[in-house]
Amino acid sequence: MKKNHIIILSVVAALLAAYIFFIENKKITTEDAASLRQKIISVPFNDIMEIRISDIVVKRAAGDTWVIAAPVKSAVDLDEADKIFNIIKTADFTGKQQVNADELKKFSIADNPALAILDRTGKQLIFKRGNKNFDGTYNILSVNDTTIYSVKPEISDIFNLTLTKIRDKKIFDFRTADILSMSIERSKTDILTFVKQRMNDVDYEWNIETPVKAEASWEKVNELIDLLVNSGASEFIDKPGDMPKNNAVASIIFSMKNPDGSVYNSETLIYKNADGGGKMYLQKNAGYPVFVINNENLFSKLMDKYAVFKTEKIFGRDFSDSQLSSVLIKYNSKALELKNKNGKFVLENMVDSTIQLPDEKMISDFIFDLVKFRAERIISDNSKDIFEYNLDKPFMQIFVTTTGGKKTINISAKNDKVFGVIFSGPTIEIFELKISADGKTPQLTEGIINFFK
């Protein structure tokens, strides 16, 4: 009998322990319960599976991931979604009262838009917005229990949600680092192609592949790609019939590498309004939606001449002083020549004997600046543009002999800016020089002018 008594006590103790464990893990704390009692939405946010506002349906996909399920399928704009979620989590009330059907009339309850919350059990809570009170609060009806809640204005903003606002604005789902090449076709005879050249696992450069083969500016190409990749839509067009009359102005093809190493292409058509309006329409892989953006800066860069994207290092990105044989400098009516003698540059001859001889440091600093020289920007490689920038009448010339051939640089001034042109065989590049911090001295020329003081 004693043995049976012990067994019964053990079973009771086990059941009691299990009950306590269940209660401790499932119950809402006193603080949480009090908090929920002060809130309009009494369902813990982690139990909410679906939010409906008018015809917009936002669903929990997995964990903390939410998607738009209707009227279109799309990712959510994370910032806007967070605003909605915070309202739902924190929406409290300053007063409440239960009302009957007759009393509802004075609160001017609108049927649309309505807010519906669906929890894990399938229970649905429905709320509708009413009129504004004299103290600035709004009346909201809980349809489930016909209770009117007075809430702050910011809480009532949830009813103003639009599909465009909650929809993910991001157009491209890849990063600049994922891109292997980019081709911009402005017309059948105007195609600009950039190809990434890997230096190692981390570093890379860009080259222009068409219409000419040339080294590209890392900054300029990445600036263009970043503008594209990080652009956000201001509107969406989901149906072909809603597309306004417009003109296709460019096609962009990105070539990218998948995590498994395979390569795929993504084509985006760019349209502009036929009436010349500022909007751009981006259509990916001939599908919908079409993304509408307002970014004249992006459009302007897409239409830039290929020369603008050439490297600012006018001697090339890998040029070094070991490739430099001699430098002849002409400034006004004076001239001097520097020659590479066993890796050291020395003054070879000087036309004007009244010039103060440059010391070794001056020569070394100048050669360093010349080899590392970067233009402010490349403007053109069209010889007709030389006259526009007064480069046919230079105030300074630099004749450079390298292991790859001879190059001539003309430097001139126009409208408080300084421009240069480099002649390298049959090709030219016109560029703008940077101005020093004092706003007076053009880059590179300061060292030369010091030679002739």
Image (tube, rainbow, N blue to C red):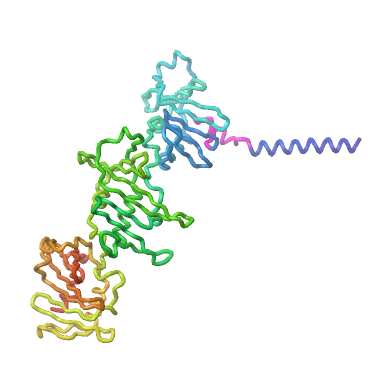
Q: Is residue 86 visible?
A: no
Q: Nearer the viewer, residue 403 or 185?
A: 185
Q: Which residues are magenta?
A: 26-45
Q: Residue at x 15, y 62 (%)?
A: 417
Q: Quadrant of residue 138?
A: top left
Above or below: residue 395 compared with residue 62: below
Q: Quadrant of the C terminus?
A: bottom left
- Determine if residue 285 is in view: yes
Residue displayed at 72% across by 38% down: 18
| 419 displayed left or right of 176 | left
* Residue name at image x 27 percent, y 54 percent: 191
Q: Nearer the viewer, residue 142 or 179?
A: 179
Say left or right for 22 vs 396.
right
Q: Residue at x 15, y 85 (%)?
A: 349
| Left-right relation of 300 to 176 | left
Is 406 within the magenta? no
Residue 293, image x, y percentages: 30, 43
Position of the N terminus, as image quadrant, is top right
**Per the image, is 32 magenta?**
yes
Please tell me in which quadrant of the rendered image residue 152 appears. Answer: top left
Q: Is residue 42 above or below residue 416?
A: above
Relative image position of residue 29 (x, y in whole percent):
60, 36
Residue 193 sits above or below residue 164 on the image: below
Instruction: Report x, y in % for residue 58.
Output: 46, 35
Q: Residue furthest right?
A: 1
